[in-house]
Structure formats: C-alpha cells, structure tokens
Image (tube, coloured by chain):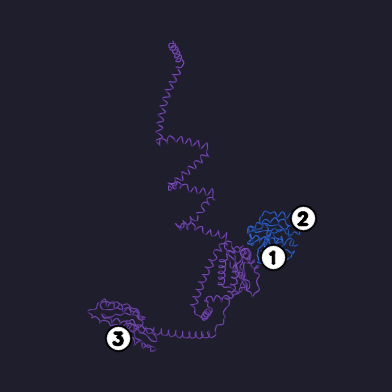
Chain colours: A blue, B purple
Amino acid sequence: MSIVKKKICLIGDFAVGKTSLIRRYVEKQFRDQYLSTVGVKISKKLVTLQPSGTPSPVEVQMMIWDLEGRTQFEALTSSSYLQGAMGAIVVGAMNRQATLGGLEDHIELFGKFNPKRPVIVALNKADLVPPDQHKSLRERYNNLTYDTVLDCQCTSAKTGENVDALFETLAKACIKNAKG
Amino acid sequence: MGAPESDSLESPFERLQTLLLEPQFSDLRQRHHTLDQQCRGLEQKLSQLAHQVSDPTALNAWLRPVIVELLKMEVAESRQDFSALAVGLMEIALTSKIQQEPATMAAVLAPIMPNSIALSSKAAPEAMGQAIAPNLSRALTAHIKTDRDALIKALAPAIGPALKAQIRLEQDAVVDALYPVIGNTISRYFAELLKEINDKLEQTLSFETVTRKYRARLQGISEAELLLREATPIQIQAVFLIHKPSGLVIAEAQPKDRSPLESDMIAGMLTAIRSFVQEYVAQPERAAELREIEYGDAQICLEEAGYCYLAVVVQGNPSRAFLRGLNGFLAQLVNDHGRIIQDFEGVLADIPEAIPQGLQQLISSAAQSNGKPPSQSPGLLRTIAGVVLILLIGWGGYWGFGQYQMAQLTAQLNQQLRQDSALALYRLEVEVGRNQLLLKGYVPSEDLAKRAIALISAQTSALPIENQVVVIQTPPPPSRETLNPKDVDAAVRRTARVLNEIEGIFLSARFENGVVQIDSVTRSLQQVKIIDQAFQDIPGVTLVQHTTRIQ
C-alpha cells in the first residue's frame, strides 16, 4: 500500500481550539491550559482510509500545520504557510460569535493561496454551547457560498466529538481532489 | 321632288348645323392646329432626345438630376432594400476593381487604414486580436528576416520589465527554466577554478606538494581534487528532496548505519522557516533564500530550485566544492524530473525510483570522497627528501658565494684595465668563464694585448686566463703633411670621451692648430699623466696644454 502525503492547515482566530483539535486527533489528549501558538506547529498523523470510489484503502500521512491564530482585524497577508496546502480546516469557537464572524475571511484567505482545495468548517467548543443551538449554527455555516467548503461540523476537542471525522473527511476529500 | 326637297332640307340642316356647330368646329380646328404644332414640337424634342442619348455627356447631364432624385426617393422610402442592393453592388464593384487594379485600390484605401485599425482595436479589441493572432508569428518571422535589428531595438526595452513581471508572476517556473543553465555555468567556472589551482600547484615546489602529487597519482585524481577532499572531512547524515510549496518530502536518503532522522517533520519545519525568513527577514525586492542552518558541528545545507529544494544534513564543514556539487546535482534532478516535481501532490508512487537512488548516490560519493588519506607519509621518502633539501641548500650557498667572489674579482680587474694609461683607450673587459677568466676586447697592437694579459695575471693567479683579445691591424699612420685636422679633432674627442669614463676623471678637450687644450678634474697626479700621454699619442697633436684640478 503506497503512502499519500497531504499538507493540511488549521486556521482561525486565536483561542478557538485549533491546537487542541490537533492534539485530540493526533495524541488523543486534551489540556485545559491555553498556550498560544507562535508561528506554526507541525504534527504528523498516519491513517488508513478508504475514500468512496477507491478500490483499496489508502495510507494517508497528514502533515497538519497548526497556524498561529489571527483575527480579521489583523493583517492577513503574512500567510505563506498556507502555500501548498491540499486542504484546510477553518475553526471558530461556538461560544464566541466574533470568531464565527471571521470564518469567511479565513476561507477566502485560504482560497487565495489554494483555489479549488477543499475546506471544512469546524465549529469547536461544542461542549460549551447547549446542544439545541448546534443544529441552527451548523445549518447557518453549512450554507456559506463557497464551492470549496465541503461541510460544517460541530466539534469538541475536549470530548472528542466529531474530531476524527473532521480530519478524515478532509483527508478523503484531499485524495479525491488530487485525483480529480 | 326629292332632290330639291332634300337640297332644301339639307340646306336648312346644314345651315342649322352650321349655326349650331360652327363655333365648335372652329374651336376644333383651332385645337387641331394647336395639336399639330405640339406634335411638331414633340417631334423636335424627340429628335433632340435621340441626339442626347447618342451623346453620353449630354445624357449624363440630363439624367443625373433624375437619378439623384430617384435615389433620394428610394433611400427615403425603402432604406433596407436599397442598402442591401448598394452593398451587393459595392462588393461586386470593389472586388472587380481590386482584381483589376490592386495597386490603385491599395493607394486609395491606405490613408484610412491606420484609423480604421485604431478604431477597430478600440471598438472590438477581442475580435481584432483574434483576427491578427493567427498571422502574428508569421509576421514576426518575416520581420526578423527582413530587419532583425529593428525588431531587437523595439523589443529590447521591454524585455527587462517583462522578465521582472514574469518572475513576479511565476518565479518558480523562471527559476526552473534557468536552473540547468546557471548550474552548468557554475560547474564550468568551478572546473576552470580547479584548473587554475592545479596550475598554481604545478608551479609550487615544496615537500607537501611532492607528497600530495604522489598521493593524487596513486588515487588517479587531480591534485586539486585531492586538496578539496582533504579540506572537506564531512559526513552526510541525510538528504531530503522537499517540495517547496507544501514542505512534503518527495524523496530522501539516509545512511543505513545511523538512526534515521524524522524527515517529514524536518522538511515541514524547514519549509516553515524558509517561508518565515522570506516573509519577515529577506527584502522583498531581492529574491534571497535561506542557504544553511548551523547547529553545533553540523549544519543543514539548503540548495534551492524552482519547485523543490534539497536539504542536506551535514556533520562537519562542507567546502564550496561540495556545495557546488549539490548545485549541479539538483540542476540535473530538476532537468530530468522537473515536471513530476512541479506536479507533486503527495503521491509517492508517482516519484520515479531514480530520484531516491540519486540521493543515495550523493551520500555514497560524499562518503568515498571523505576518506581522507593517511596523514603519515612514507618515512624513507621524508628522510631522503630532507637530505636532498639540505644538500640543495648547501650547494646553493656554496655556489652563491663563489658567484659573489667572481663578481668582485672581475669588477676589480676591469677597474685596473680602465686605469691603465695605454689600455684605457680600448674596450677591454674581463668576464668569468667556465673555471677560467676571459679577457675580451680589441686592441691595435700585439704589445697592447700582451700588456693587458700581464696586467690581469699580476692581479690574480687563482684562475687561468684565456686571451680572447683581438689585435686589429691598423693602417700606417699618415704623415703630418697628409693629416686632416678634422680627423685629428675627431681622435681628440674620442680620446676625451674614453678618458671621461675612468672613475675620478672629468675633462674637456679642444683641438686647434695642432694644439690640444685640456681642462680637467682628476683624483691623482697619475691620472694627469695618463691624460697627457693619451693626447700626446694622437698623430697630428703637436702640443698638449693641460689645466687640471686634483681633488
């Protein structure tokens, strides 16, 4: 089974839980302590996936780039780390409306560097918001007018809710995207 | 009865008729007359018309107003029909005219062509572009054939900015395009540099050089290459070929006897660092790149191409030659597999086996070249060379001292010859020959030659003297009556010039009527005597008047 390598970026405002999502996915751990990411942190995750329409499973090595959090008020130009990414997870915190407002800026920024590459929106910190609000929020951000946005998922790095699915959906999309 | 009745009846009838119809008849007659006149007028006009039809000029003048009026009416009433008709006619007329007289038509249309093209370009630029595009390359080719210089002049100012723009748009593509050329240029430069080093080494004689030459000969490589190898005791820990945009490892090679480095993480972070440096440190107008990262006694050398870069983890201090080698290696790699590297999407199966093999060879060749030769040189060779060197130094010193002594001796002997009253006039010189002294020169008599040999022999007995003095047989001196005063004057001047060459003598001599007047500065009374004797010996000189000052 040959290995396919994919660079995936996590972008979003600061303190929305990007690093926590990666730690949950890669290390199966969660820490309450907040440590701001400076610049970029790279993690590696090797998974075996079987995207729909492929005859055999594919071993995917995801190089996950955890980019320093930014807000829409800051300059968004210094993002050459996004170059060459084959997919992105744009993260917002469900309990902070301002971070959800910046989702579109991040999607557009990623699209500027990597047009046609798939994007998934993660509404993180779902454990801090009552479950009855999940559906409406998800529907709202699922209907963003971007062709590249595949899905919007409510996630929780703390509980692990939808975290694996988030990364693996994107990885499968990356494989399909590369083939297409 | 009938006839008179009828006559009587007709007469009244006729009279009645006349009475009733006469005015109408009269009117009719009048009209008939008028009609006749009109017919005649019409006949005249018809004949005129017939004449006008047969005369084109007259017909043209006659029909023009009518045709104009008709055309106006037609245009006003059915514009579309008329337009279609006119277009058809124009097309036919123009086609026919162009076929018949192409040059005339070209001249007619020429004034409006520039404006027409300008307007079309403005009104429908895309259509204009499409119309011109198919012939653009042909036009350029033809123009290059006819006037290459003009095209070069026209394009030259735009090439610089165009290149800059292209670099801004697609820097990676430009780099990849130029990389093989630049790499080869550097390689050629380096080859010349090696040659230069070799030449210099050839000219330098030292013990180290001799042993290096010996080692290089044994290994079958050039001396410069050996020098470079000795100067680069390095170990390659890993070689990574990294996709520049994504930071993914395209291929890697690491020595098998070491624990492998985490290539993907290193490649990712290196790419991030490169991006950081480019974004925050390097000046935007200068395409500067991170070349190396040092840590402890190791470093990561980065060699960059368009869509990929080579990261080589090296322990030790790599030489320039090594870095040039990397450059050449990467240039070859890009040349061979540029398209695959550019389109790399993380699928390792797409990477040809030749790439990782090439990286592995890089490590192997570097390991071989690092085999620094043993520093201990053969002891016997060292001893022999030492002895030879001492002997050379001793012999050199002895030879130098001998040369110095001989130089001193010849200077002394030459000085003696110049100070001898009889010999000073002649060019005699002592030189050092092969284990002997050579006495060379020309004298007018055998006696003078013997005098010179005797003088030299008296001064030195260390070396044999070879007499190479040539005796020139001079004609017998002319009698005083036949002596030419000019010849005597010339002899006086020549003698004065020769005497002035003797150290300590400064004199001037004037010959007039057989008398030589001398004004001199000398060092000794003996020199005064030499001067007097020399001038008295000149045939034709009757008296020498000498004023001197001894210093």
Residue visible at 55% across and 72% down?
B321
> Where, by quadrant of the figure, is residue B293 drawn?
bottom right
Q: Are marks 3 and 1 in contact (CB under 8 Å)?
A: no
Q: Nearer the viewer, mark 3 or mark 2?
A: 2
Q: CA distance from mark 1 to mark 2?
A: 34 Å
Residue visible at 53% across and 70% down?
B187
Find numbered disc 1 in the image and state the secondary structure of the residue it sits on.
Answer: strand
**Residue A41 can be seen in this image:** no
**Are labels 3 and 1 assigned to the same chain?**
no
**Are labels 3 and 2 assigned to the same chain?**
no
Which amino acid lies under the numbered mark 1 shown in the image of this protein?
A: Thr
Left or right, B43 with reference to B73: left
Residue visible at 44% across and 20% down?
B28
Mark 1 lies on residue: A48
Mark 3 lies on residue: B446
Of residues A8 and B139, the one drawn nearer to the viewer in this rendering: B139
x then y, percent, for residue B156: 49, 58
Which amino acid lies under the numbered mark 2 shown in the image of this protein?
A: Asp
Q: Tell me the tag on residue A132.
A: 2
Instruction: Quarter of the image for the C terminus of chain B: give it.
Output: bottom left
The residue sitting at the bottom extreme is: B461
x then y, percent, for residue B62: 43, 34
x then y, percent, for residue B517: 29, 78
- Subunit of label 2: A
Mark 2: give few (<14), some (14-19) or many (20+) Cα within 10 Å: few
Which amino acid lies under the numbered mark 3 shown in the image of this protein?
A: Glu
**Residue A74 can be seen in this image:** yes
